[in-house]
Structure formats: C-alpha cells, structure tokens
Amino acid sequence: MRIPTTVALAATLAIPAVLAPTKPIAAQEHHGMYDGPTVLRGARMLDVETGQMHTDAVIVVDDGVITAVNPETVPDVMHDMNLGDVTLLPGFIDAHTHLGGQISATSFTDAVTRTEAWGAYNAVVYGGRTIRAGFTTVRDYGGDVTVELGHAVERGDIVGPRVVPSRHPLGITGGHCDVTGFAPGVREGGIEEGVADGPWEVVEAVRYQIKHGAQVIKTCATAGVLSMEGPVGAQQYTLEELTAMVEEAARHGIKVAAHAHGPEGILAAVQAGVASIEHGSVLTDEIMDLMIEKGTYLVPTTYLADRIDLDALPPLVRSKAEQIRPVMRVSLQRAIERGVPIAFGTDAGVFPHGENAGEFGIYVQLGMTELDALRTATIHAADLLDTPDRGRLAEGMLADIIAVPGNPLDDIEVTRDVRFVMLGGRVIKHVMGGRDMHSMGH
C-alpha cells in the first residue's frame, strides 16, 4: 500500500523530546550513552537462531556494540543495569514502513496541500514512536524524508530507528506508485520521482534513486489500495521492465522490493528476481513454489487489515480495501503452511505508528510458532535488508537491544509492551514502575 506524502527532512526541526547532539550513535555520551562498558541483566535472553532461552542473562556493551554475552566473569563497570523480570531480545526490524505520514481524512489531498516540512516533522515524530515500540531498524518508503531521516539518526540528531531507505518508488505512469486523481499538470512525476515506462526509463529511474540515497528500490508491480487508479491487483510493470529494474539495481548491489497484490504481477516480480514481495495478497501454488525455490521473501503487512481507518478513505479506495483485506489472511496462512520465507513488515502509517508489534500476533494466529514469528523481525528481516550486524544478541553485533515483560515464547503479545530500548549502546527507553525513567531524565 502507498501513502501520498511529501518528501525531505527539514534541518531546522526543533522537537526537544527527540533532539540530541550531532555525534555518531556509537560515540554519544549523554541521554543514556555511558562512558565505558555497560552491563545489562535480565531474567531471560532469547537466542533467536537456536531458540534457546537463557536465564539470568548478562550482556556487556561498549562503544555501541555487544562485547560479551553471558561471560564467565562480568567486568566491574560503573553502569550495571538489572532490568528484572524481562526477556532480552534483539531490536526488531520492520521491513515496510511509511514514517512520513499516517492515514487521515486528508491523506488523498496532502500531496497538493502540504509542504515538505510537514513530511519531515511527521518522520521525526513517528520515528520516535517506532523506536520506542522496540523497532530499532526500518526499511522505509518515503522519498527524501526516508534518506535524510536515516542520516539524522546516524548522526544522533534525533531519536529514531536506523533506516534502510528507498527514496521514491518506481511505477508506471498513472499507476499505484504515481500520484493520481488530480487534473493534468498537477503533481506530474518523471524518473526523478520514480515514474518510468519501458526498460530504459526504468533503468534511468533506478540509477537516479540510487544516486540520491536509495539503499533499496521499491516498485509497484501491481495496482494497489491506497491510490485512485484501477483494480487493486492488476499487473502494472511487465516482466521485461521488472527484469531491467532488478538487473540494474543488482549492478549497484541493491535489492528490489515489489509491492504486489494480484497473482500475475506477483509472479512476474518473482520471475524477475525481486528480493521481496510486499503484501502478496493472492498467492498461487506456482508463485509459492517459485518463492521457495528462489528464496524470495514475503513481507505480509497483515495487521493493517484490523486497524486501517476505513471511514477516512474515499469510496473507491474503501471498496478496494474491503475487497482485499480477507484475501490477504488466506494467502499468508497458506504461505506459512508451505514454508515460504517471511520477513516482518507492517505498512505502518496505514495504521497508527507505534503499533508495529501487532503484526506478530497475526502470524501466530495463522499458524507460526512464537519463535518463528520473532525470527521474521530479527534474523530473517536482517537477511532481507543485508544488515548482518543486527538481528541477534551476540558478540560483535550492534547493541540494538530491547526487553519485554515475561516470556514471548509463551505469549507473543508481550512484544506490544516493550519496557527497554537501547540503540547502539544508547538507552532510548527504560520503563520502571510504569514510568519511562529515561524520558524523565533519570
């Protein structure tokens, strides 16, 4: 799904709750970033690779990375934090977000009534909500906002998740990735905005997005829901165009993620070699077999079916949403049963940001084990995003660490109650006695 948003991150934003000095994440020495090593303790720690739940867990963090896990001897450090009856987990990864906006009654006119600063403000606010929900990395689809938000987080200017940005998505003229519904001449796009027709325009559009910061290429292989064009699942890009896109992106070491609802477009995208199918609402046996063969990830985005505000949608869009919602769950359940690779993604922004963990519960309801559900947002998502430095709690990994109450292998819903968040060794959130002690300055 696509949310029309403005793009670019305003450098002059002043939001005291999320500002921080301009130092790299791993070098900050304020607001929860301590001098010297830090020891974290918890009643439990999950090894998401093996499935082993360790008790009386200890993690040592220094200079933004994990330096030891359950060492035989714990160093004598100034900062030794016992988090109590929690389970320590690697920070979650959401492979499909839209931090630049959120569905509202004005969403379908925002493209021509809002300024770029509006999208930038949204990205900061919603990014803050996302990381405090335990999601320390996102793959975000939001134009220049996406790119600049990631830079700002890495500099330490704002509190937000690490970002793998796509810049502008690629789509056909008048398709789901184009801005439609306005008079001729209003918000027309070209290759700079990702609107490209035919293999050579597609190649040029890929090159332009990468030139300006894209670390993944998103494309609309089919029509979609949150746009004013035709049937929700109709194929838009041809196999030839998709193949040109994937091959050009690969020359730059970049993957392609394909928004796709209908089977013809999904099949063409998988045949072309995309890394992931976003949504994948109608999956046939042929498609699932090919996804398993090629290792193509499904990024399901299913929680939104329960949380999208249908009353905020124009009649055409609401009709498409009501048509596709029940079908998505059927395809996901079959994909889980057949063993299709699945990486966690939510389409956050279609529903309120910060509720991302609601996706876990849907996976479990449809047949996943709690452990496998957690793996979708850790080791599987890290593999899809080509970020091997996160997604596990192990020596040498980034110190992106969260804690949830109780045991998520017994109750996956505890993932919606994140009590502690650390990003690169910096404490972002620490709830004690019902209060976030970090945000209070303690």
Image (cartoon, helix red, strand yellow):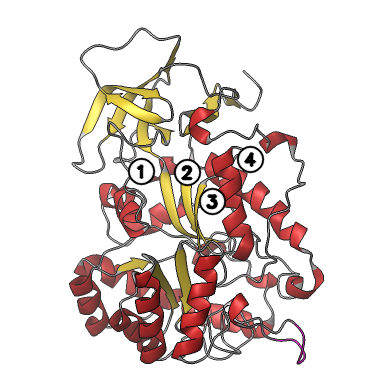
Q: Which residue is mark 4?
A: 158
User: Real-space Cα distance between discs 3 and 2?
Assistant: 14 Å
Between marks 4 and 2 in the image, the one whose residue lies nearer the viewer:
4
For residue 355, the mark is 3
Residue situated furthest right in the rendering? 113
Question: Label 4 sits on what residue type?
Answer: Ile
> 55 or 241, which lies in front?
241
Near-viewer residue (427 or 150)? 150
| Residue at image coords 46%, 70% | 217
- Which image quadrant is residue 179 in? bottom right
| Label 3 vs label 2, nearer the camera | 2
Cα–Cα span, label 4 and label 2: 13 Å
Q: Earlier in the sequence, mark 1 or mark 4?
A: 4
Range shown magenta: 181-186
* Amino acid type for the residue under numbered disc 3: Glu
Residue 342, by quadrant, is bottom left
Which residue position is annotated with label 2?
136
